[in-house]
Amino acid sequence: MDTPQLTADAEDRIVYVRPVDVADLPEEVRAQAPDANNLYAVHAANGDRLALVNGQKLAFVLARQNSFDPVHVH
């Protein structure tokens, strides 16, 4: 998968991390993650998906590297 780059409003630095079932994703995305059962999505406060990565830890690291404050959503 390509390395994501997060962007959002400078005023809203909170992002939400949640698990995503790979089976619920479009075929083109599933093809990029053939061995994964779930991925983790990073979402802006308005619901826009900013990134999709393989692992919760990676999602949190990615968010923090881009000066966001990640919050886990169940």
Image (tube, rainbow, N blue to C red):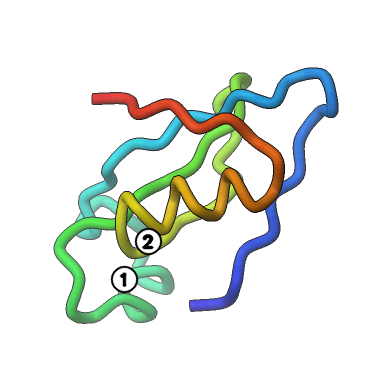
Relative to residue 20, is residue 31 depicted above or below? below
2 or 1: mark nearer the eye: 1
Nearer to the camera, 27 or 40: 40
Relative to residue 60, is residue 14 depicted above or below? above
Mark 1, other Cα within 10 Å: few <14 / some 14–19 / many ≥20 = some
Q: Secondary structure at mark 2?
A: loop
Residue 55 point in image, percent of width and height: 30, 58
Question: Going 58% across and 30% down the picture, which residue do you hit?
Answer: 69
Q: Secondary structure at mark 1?
A: helix
Question: Going 42% across and 73% down the picture, which residue do you hit?
Answer: 28
Callouts 2 and 1 close, C-beta under 8 Å: yes
Question: Going 55% across and 41% down the picture, which residue do you hit?
Answer: 49
Q: Which mark is residue 68?
A: none
Callout count: 2
Mark 2, other Cα within 10 Å: few <14 / some 14–19 / many ≥20 = few
Question: Going 55% across and 54% down the picture, which residue do you hit?
Answer: 62
Q: Amino acid at mark 2?
A: Pro
